[in-house]
Image (tube, helix red, strand yellow):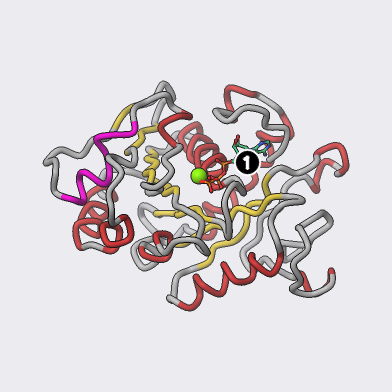
Amino acid sequence: MADIEKREFLLFDNKSFPVAEAIKAARTNLMFITAKDECPVISFTSSHMGEGKSTVCANMALAFAEAGFKTLIIDADMRKPAINKYFKIKSSPGLSDILGGLVKENFIYPTKYKNLHVLPSGTIPPNPSELLTSERMTLLLSELRNTLDYIFIDTPPILIVTDALAISDKVTGTVLAVRQNYSRTNLIKDAVDAINKVNGKFLGFIFNDYNIEAMSYNKQYRYGKNGYKYERYGGYDNKPVTPPVNLDND
Ligand SMILES: Nc1ncnc2c1ncn2[C@@H]1O[C@H](COP(=O)(O)OP(=O)(O)OP(=O)(O)O)[C@@H](O)[C@H]1O
Ligand SMILES: [Mg+2]
């Protein structure tokens, strides 16, 4: 993804052709690697703050909705909600209120986009990780899975709080957002290790904020299942990720 200037950037509002193509290519790969699930639940995280988790999550969900799939975004970043801003809805009541037993109804909001709904993060609670590991969260997801095609979950950074790991056993898999000239390779490795350690399924990276000018057309997008081969580029150091970094198998 590249050339995103404003926070509420959404693919089909912006209509930047290369960005749209990159997101659609990521959509296709995600469909293949989650195909065995009736309703895949895909969580988005990153090693640190500001790498583009929420932007990538919102845009991927929109790409699936645009393709005709009944899609829900759950904002599970109860500490720093963002998804509601993209769709101009309020952040509560929402997930935390449902998981805390404060409300009976599932507060799922329609968006102006066909097939796309949002469950916002809800009232900021003192115990997000606890709520996310709860049996109520498991029940909520299995209930939602019955009526949807895809569920996307935005979460906080994996190396800062445990929230993303707290749901890793409840989701089909986890995608890591990596940002050009910002994300650090040693921290990306730590994030992947953290997912593996709790037996979560690491689905791959989405390489965000690419410098499109610098890349040939077919290299603007990076997404790969077994994706990190930083050794070729100097090992797991703490340098910012800069193209060309081969995050693919090819
Ligand atoms: N590809 C991009 N091009 C330009 N700006 C971007 C891009 N991706 C994200 N941003 C901007 O960077 C900021 C952080 O992005 P975003 O909120 O998606 O990151 P995040 O990883 O969810 O952050 P947090 O850790 O705070 O939840 C936002 O202001 C967003 O608009
Ligand atoms: Mg975010």
**The quadrant where residue 42 appears:** bottom left
- Given the image, on which type of amino acid does mark 1 rest? Ile
Q: Position of residue 120 (x, y in %)?
A: 34, 38
195 falls in the magenta region: no
* Residue 116 appears in the picture as rendered: yes
Q: Residue furthest front?
A: 126
- Give the magenta part as a residue range: 91-100
Q: Quadrant of the N terminus?
A: top right
Q: Residue at x 48, y 58 (%)?
A: 34
Q: Position of residue 127 (x, y in %)?
A: 28, 57
* Relative to 244, 161 lies left or right: left
Label 1 within 8 A of ligand 1 by Cβ:
no
Q: Residue at x 62, y 57 (%)?
A: 205
Q: Quadrant of the C terminus?
A: bottom right
Q: Position of residue 86 (x, y in %)?
A: 48, 29
Looking at the image, which is closer to me, 212 or 218? Answer: 212
94 falls in the magenta region: yes
* Relative to 179, 52 lies left or right: left
**The quadrant where residue 123 appears:** top left
- Which residue was labeled with disc 1? 23
